[in-house]
Image: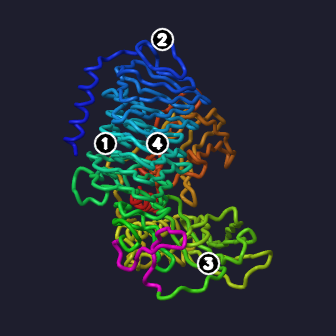
Amino acid sequence: MKSTLKKNLSMVCAFTMLLGVVTIMPGARSRADATLVAGDELPATSGTYVLGESIEVTKEAVIPSGESVVIDLNGNTLHMGDSFRFYTIEGTLTVKDTSAQEAGCFIGNSSIPSGENGGIFLVKSGGILNLQSGSLLSGKVTESQASVLTNPKGLGGAVYCAGTFNMTGGSIKGCRAEAGGAVFVPQAGTFNMSGGELQLNTAVSAGGAICIGGSGTPGTLRLSGNAAIYENTCNHVYPIDAISPQKNASAAGGGICAVFSNNISVSGNVRISDNTCGYSPTDPRNNLYFTLPAAVLTISGSLGSGADIHFDRADSTLVSGMGEDAATYTSGLSGNGTAASFTCDRAEFSFVENENGELILKDNSQQQQQEVTLGISGYNVSLGGDIALNAYITVPEDKDVEKLSVSATYSYLVEKNGKNKTETNTFSFTSGDMVLDPDHGYKISVPVESACMTSEITFTLTYDGEELPDTYTTTVNNYANTLIGKTSTSSSDKETLKKLLIYGLYAQKQFEINLSELPSGNGVSYDPSGPSSYLVDAPFGGFTDPAHKDLYVGASVVFLTTNKVKFYFTEAVDFAVQYEDDGIWKEITPKKSGGYYVYILDGPYGIGFPATTYSQGFSIRIGTTEYPGCYSIVRYLESVMASSSTSQSMKNLAKAYYNFASSIY
């Protein structure tokens, strides 16, 4: 297939040479509903524009919001002769080729300048790109070791879509990027592909054809009709911050890579096959690959006889629940046609078709369906960063979820200085706080402090103002051990769960909480010298502020429910933080505590620093002095290990947290 593409590209080039290359000069006129000829700019106002000949352009155009531009390639070529993409799209651009051969194409330059996204088109939020026919060829963006979160550059060899991209036909071929060789879909972006082909595109790190990723509002990828994604590749190895589930892992998703929480649905005769990661033809990451459990593949409709889908999810992300029902885990999904044609790599599950024509996993280990009653049917331990116990509530069809509320309560004993004090945390949930999981029921998430792994969490349900008689009780420690004991839990997840419990154990020792009920079982035990650690050999000596050395006291990290960073000063200062995700300086107002002015940093999303971001650096500004990328959770851990004045129990906690965080990073 590669030689065929080279032949086709040669034919396009030869065809262009016969016609002659006509350069569109900047500053010339733009006409609506016209034939594009020499001297015309790329049009940016509403209208239909037909290429009268193959032409070269030297200037990018911006389609403003409210404008709708239609480009009919008419069998001709638009070639970019300078280091710019063709369009930034804030309005609407439709590309089609009404010629019989549909051989018209956009040919990108060899490379967009470093630090840019979208080699041919950049679709901004609110913008719309429609590709109906014709081709996008040879787009390229570059950025060494790009990252979806911390260095979002060099993404989308042909298209970077923060708005909506509808592809009903045509093709994208021979494009290259650090992530998303053909198309990159960031948070809140949408890519609907119901036809056409993505072939022979390349990414260095993630998604040879498509990478959909980023934190925040999930991106959406809908594949249907005869959409074909094949013979694309990822071909490099290096530590990929926030893309790969572990450092030094090979590139992921030769066809598609989904990063973090995203929505992907498939129906029709979709083909996702024959893609590679550049190392092994049997690598499970070759085709459709998910890095975290929050990304979900939905078979949203009947699949045709031509469907060919190969799917894998990172082993480290599975946390099954619901009595061995791991319906979100479909590693090895492949086949075509009806449910009977699909296979799962776990013998205890099979694919069945529900009344809506959707494919779902059936748990064969459950011999019979139990009558659905209102209550909690299962649990799940979250390994996404923050510690949480998820509970799933089944609601019968004759019950209205709007009338349901749930309370979750747990207590813990603080045993300091010979005095015991009981504290209680209570959480209330209404229907608006519940997330519907089609397979498990309505999910609620109870945040659990690191030192409370052994605290009993009691759930009480109230329906239509009346408290139900049954209550439900479990602990993070008990359910984590249940998961560790299951054969369906992957070995990497078992190790992560053990490290979670060990982290909780040393947190309880450090904060002197629930000392008589320490996490245990499955190799979890207390060692006064602390757990083994993989902290770097050159520890960070701690942040210093020479400009305010007489005022700056130090920094600390709170290791309880959500990790927050605190900076202490003896007097108030102008303090601001800049997170890499948004690049915006945020002023922090201090809180007065213990004679100090305390500046609390709660992360880029206001929820603290999840374990998945433990190595993510941020910048601070004190007065007018800026300290770029000066601090992170891992730097605090390293400074703890380097300090001779730090207690052994605190060093133990730092080691335990590092081991847990690095296992899910």
The residue located at (65%, 65%) in the rendering is: 434
Disc 4 vs disc 2: which is toward the camera? 2
**Residue on which the image places disc 1:** 201
Of the two numbered discs 3 and 1 on the same chain, state the one appearing first in sequence: 1
Picture quadrant where residue 172 is located: top left
Query: Residue 617, which numbered label?
Result: 4
Mark 2 closeness class: few <14, some 14–19, many ≥20 residues within 10 Å: few
Of the two numbered discs 4 and 3 on the same chain, state the one appearing first in sequence: 3
3D distance between C-alphas at marks 4 and 3: 40 Å
Picture quadrant where residue 616 is located: top left
Disc 4 vs disc 3: which is toward the camera? 3
Amino acid found under the numbered disc labelled 1: Asn
Magenta range: 343-366
The residue located at (42%, 31%) in the rendering is: 116
Of the two numbered discs 3 and 2 on the same chain, state the one appearing first in sequence: 2
**Residue on which the image places disc 2:** 28
Question: In what element is the residue under mark 3?
Answer: strand
3D distance between C-alphas at marks 3 and 2: 68 Å
In the image shown, does 125 or 409 lie closer to the viewer?
125
Q: Quadrant of the C terminus?
A: bottom left
Q: Is residue 486 above or below residue 416?
A: below
Amino acid found under the numbered disc labelled 4: Gly
Of the two numbered discs 1 and 4 on the same chain, state the one appearing first in sequence: 1
Disc 3 vs disc 1: which is toward the camera? 1
